[in-house]
Image: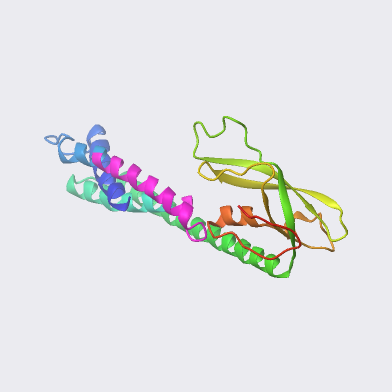
Amino acid sequence: MAAGSAWAGYGLGCTIIDANDDAPAAYVAQGAAGAGTVGGLLLAVIGAVGWLVMMDRFPLALSGWHGAGLLLLCSVPGLVVATRELGAGGWYDVAAAGLATAGLLALLGGSLLAARRRLRWLEELRLIAEGTPTVATVVDSGIAPNDFEEASNLITIATFRFWGADGTPYLLHQRVTIPAAAPIAEGQRTTVWYDPANPLDERRIVVAMVHALRWNVPIPRVSVDGPAVPS
């Protein structure tokens, strides 16, 4: 992705400089410029797809902001080489500085987002350690029959039912990203950790299967009074 972005920065830089008549009169943006534009963009797109796969595997460390920042930042050297090669400058140097600034800000935003997600992850681990576990059942998966026809993942609201220590039933609504390869279904069981002092406080509730899907980790398992079958 970085190499493709740099190559595309060079190709697009040469093309734009030539189109604006800021290149030497004998210069025509072909050959290396065209290859850089097409080949660089293709490599950048392939790299971006790979980055999305990496984000799914490492949600605590990587985000889309990191990817956008790398694309912007890595395009700068290519643009700088194009401007120096063609003797351009001025606004093109300003554009390069702008791309670099935007890339750095995106990387900073990605780092802040990763830190926030890390805090959320640690908070869920704390709630699992301190909460009371019980069996929960999926009463509404939030999945329609045709939802996975054109998508590999579905973001929806799933509804779970669990029972408190006194036998009181509670309904819990959780936003969850469900992969097509592992859909959830009504009647499926999992474990819920909740605060007995306030069972309706969803900020203090962790659902095992949602936790696993959110962070791409194994499903937490614990012995509860009932046949919990996380999935």
Can you give x and y, in whole percent of width and height, for residue 215 in the image?
55, 57
Residue 117 lies in magenta, yes or no? no
Q: Magenta-highlighted stretch: main secondary structure? A: helix
Q: In the rendered view, tell whether residue 160 sits above or below residue 115.
A: above
Number of callouts = 0
Q: Nearer the viewer, residue 84 or 138?
A: 138
Report the magenta residues as a range.
39-65
Looking at the image, which residue is at 38% across and 53% down? 70
Residue 18 sits in which quadrant?
A: top left
Q: Is residue 122 left or right of residue 78?
A: right
Looking at the image, which residue is at 83% across and 50% down? 169
Q: Nearer the viewer, residue 55 or 64?
A: 55
Residue 127 sits in which quadrant?
A: bottom right
Can you give x and y, in whole percent of width and height, for residue 69 in the image?
42, 52
* Residue 106 visible in image: no
Can you give x and y, in whole percent of width and height, for residue 51 in the image?
40, 51
Q: Is residue 32 left or right of residue 17?
A: left
Looking at the image, which residue is at 48% across and 61% down? 61
* Residue 118 visible in image: yes
Can you give x and y, in whole percent of width and height, for residue 110 in the image?
49, 56
